[in-house]
Image (cartoon, rainbow, N blue to C red):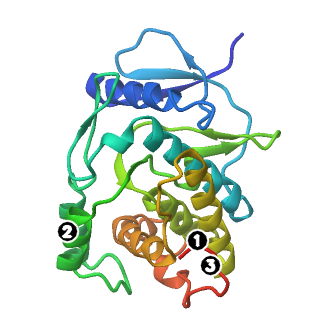
Amino acid sequence: MSIFYVKLYPDPLARQRALFNYAWLAGLEPHVRLPPLIPGEGAGQLRFGHITGRHVLPADLTAVAAHLGAAHGAAHASELRQARLDKPYRTLAGYTLPGFPGSRADAVARELEAGSAPGTWLTAGEARRLITETDGPAAFYKDANPRNFLITPASEIVAIDFDDLTLAPFGYDLAKLVITLAMTHGPIPAGDIAAALEAYNSAATRQSATLPGVTWEELMTWAEVHHVLTSRYATGGRYPCHWDQARPTAHPEGISWP
């Protein structure tokens, strides 16, 4: 008997959106590996083949960062070089990826006004400008928290959970991985984050040599946006600590990307 995982969706539209996201990401193979989709009936569900593996740990950060960089670089080289971050993008397959600002600016403002992000240096105005005025090359956001990947016994990285997919600046999804790993397992040394950033940039530019690379300052700025958006989950118990307890306190020495 086949072993599979059933993902339930609240309505057919949510299921269809996840199915599109899966199909679009599948087009990035071999830079993205996904669990097999098993055909079957069910307006509110998708079935995926079973993958044996574990979730991401801090020791996996550099490897998963390189995986993300390759996927983002490949997506940019094959299609997203034509996208603008501030506008939805109609893919070659005829589906639409939401633009980066979307509802993010309003969501960040709500969280800041609610005071749910302790110790942040962002103001609502700064965050809104950052999100709505950011330009540059487009990658994508797939909510790269540690639970949304599986590391197989053969050390392959498999992406799971396809509910969220939008355009995003390079480094934005890496920042989500960094802060959620730290919020789950505690502070990560700045040197380890810098090594992950270098791996990400190197993998991305191997796919598209014209990419400028993400700076440390850019990565930490996107991490702060994620801090604002994610802190309520720490308060709710999903994460043991907040980013303000785990963020690096200094620029790492010897980082090789500008």
- Above or below, comparing residue 212 to residue 29 in the picture: below
SS label for mark 3: loop
Residue 101: image x %, image y %?
23, 56
Q: Residue at x 53, y 64 (%)?
A: 180
- Above or below, comparing residue 93 to residue 74 in the picture: above
Q: Residue at x 82, y 39 (%)?
A: 154
Left/right placement of residue 165 relative to residue 156 reads: left
Q: Which residue is mark 3?
A: 187
Outermost residue, bottom direction? 250
How many numbered circles are shown? 3
Determine which quarter of the picture holds residue 196. Answer: bottom right
The residue under label 1 is which amino acid type? Answer: Ala
Between residues 239 and 98, which one lies in front from this camera angle?
Answer: 98
The residue under label 2 is which amino acid type? Answer: Arg
Q: Which residue is mark 1?
A: 182
Q: Residues within 10 Å of mark 2 (few under 14, many from 20)?
A: some
> Mark 2 or mark 1: which comes first in sequence?
2
Between residues 32 and 37, which one lies in front from this camera angle?
Answer: 32
The residue under label 3 is which amino acid type? Answer: Pro
Task: Calculate the distance from the C-alpha at mark 2 to the C-alpha at mark 1.
Answer: 24 Å
Give the number of the disc on residue 110: 2
- Above or below, comparing residue 86 to residue 256 in the picture: above
Residue 57: image x %, image y %?
69, 59
Task: Calculate the distance from the C-alpha at mark 3 to the C-alpha at mark 1.
Answer: 5 Å
* Residue 165 in view of the camera: no
The quarter in which the N terminus is drawn is top right
Contact flag, marks 2 and 1 (Cβ < 8 Å): no
Left/right placement of residue 200 relative to residue 168 reads: right
Contact flag, marks 3 and 1 (Cβ < 8 Å): yes
Determine which quarter of the picture holds residue 236. Answer: bottom left
Left/right placement of residue 40 relative to residue 87 reads: right
